Image: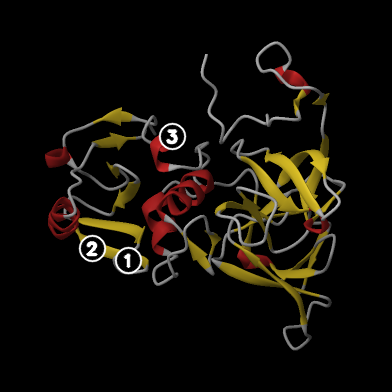
């Protein structure tokens, strides 16, 4: 069986213990759980700051760490989507109390005090996980400070209209591998939007194309996913898409016909349209 290297914690010198008998490696490690304590942690292809950005792990996300090198790079796997790579070790700490809420605003601030006039401790992006201990004066008190309560939702609450969620990011710059409101790519926009709706979603567009049931492009409706090789968009209606794309270098709404024609001129046609089950 061929294992996807993006999702397989195995390298020439080390592999995850659960892969014994599936891969060859001189040593295996059980791994230790950590959570992200920075606004986001870049996950890179190699342990270098100039290495390709594959994705990002958001504040509060869990990462299984299998190795930390002498240069401060942790090699591990993001729990939510299984992506494997190198993250800054100083962005990770041992987990504490289980999260209770997630950020539902594109970006919010964590304040030291429940007062908008105080200096923020840090920004948090959509999809970040926090643990709320109590609420007071419109603020939720978390493990590191206070967040405006209306920018949070309990983990049990979902936003079923993921096209509307994607539209929250309109104007956000396009960034390959990005996953925050400072910059994201097409598949990150889909992943964030679907997971806010309670739908487990892989990270990359080729993986996402395995979701749902195929429908004809002519039957397109709100919430359908439109795929090209290496790209994905969400239908707002039968004639309009929202997607993060390198043509606009941003998250943009675009007429379906214009997007199909423009991308076809680059030699790529729609590969599938998928409808997710309610």
Q: CA distance from mark 2 to mark 3?
A: 24 Å
SS assignment at label 1? strand
User: At x 44% / y 70%, what residue is drawn?
Assistant: 173
Q: Where is residue 61 shown, x and y percent of the image?
A: 70, 48
Depth check, mark 2 against mark 3: the one in front is: 3
**Quadrant housing the C terminus:** top left
Q: Sequence order check: which comes first, mark 1 or mark 3?
A: 3
The x, y position of residue 33, in whole percent, is 81, 39
> Within the image, what quadrant is residue 257 found in?
bottom left
Name which of mark 2 and mark 3 comes first in the sequence.
3
What residue appears at the point 76 percent right and 29 percent down from the top-left corner?
14
Q: Which mark is residue 78?
A: none
Q: Which mark is residue 252?
A: 1
Question: Which picture quadrant has residue 5?
Answer: top right
In front here: 233 or 17?
Answer: 17
Q: Position of residue 268 (x, y in %)?
A: 20, 46
Q: Element under label 2?
A: strand
Which residue is identified by label 3? 207
Residue furthest toward the bottom?
A: 117
Residue 24 lies left or right of residue 271; in this view the side is right
Against 248, residue 93 (above or below) is above
């Amino acid at each position: 069986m061929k294992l996807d290297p993006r999702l397989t914690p195995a390298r020439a010198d080390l592999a995850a213990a659960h892969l014994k008998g599936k891969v060859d490696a001189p040593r295996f490690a059980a791994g230790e759980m950590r959570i992200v304590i920075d606004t986001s942690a870049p996950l890179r292809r190699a342990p270098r700051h100039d290495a390709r950005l594959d994705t990002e792990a958001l504040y509060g996300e869990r990462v299984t760490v299998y190795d930390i090198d002498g240069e401060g790079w942790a090699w591990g796997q993001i729990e939510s989507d299984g992506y494997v790579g190198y993250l800054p070790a100083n962005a990770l700490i041992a987990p504490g109390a289980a999260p209770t809420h997630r950020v539902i605003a594109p970006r919010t601030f964590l304040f030291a005090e429940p007062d908008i006039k105080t200096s923020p401790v840090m920004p948090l992006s959509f999809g970040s996980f926090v643990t709320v201990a109590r609420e007071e004066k419109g603020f939720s008190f978390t493990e590191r400070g206070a967040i405006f309560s209306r920018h949070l939702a309990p983990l049990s609450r979902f936003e079923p209209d993921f096209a509307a969620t994607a539209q929250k990011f309109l104007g956000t710059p396009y960034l390959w591998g990005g996953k925050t409101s400072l910059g994201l790519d097409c598949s990150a926009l889909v992943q964030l939007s679907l997971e806010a709706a309670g739908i487990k979603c892989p990270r990359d567009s080729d993986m996402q194309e395995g979701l749902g049931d195929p429908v004809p492009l002519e039957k397109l409706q709100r919430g359908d996913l439109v795929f090209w090789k290496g790209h994905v968009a969400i239908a707002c209606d039968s004639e309009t898409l929202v997607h993060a794309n390198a043509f606009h270098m941003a998250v943009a709404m675009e007429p379906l016909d214009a997007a199909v024609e423009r991308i076809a001129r680059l030699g790529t046609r729609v590969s599938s349209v998928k409808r997710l089950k309610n």
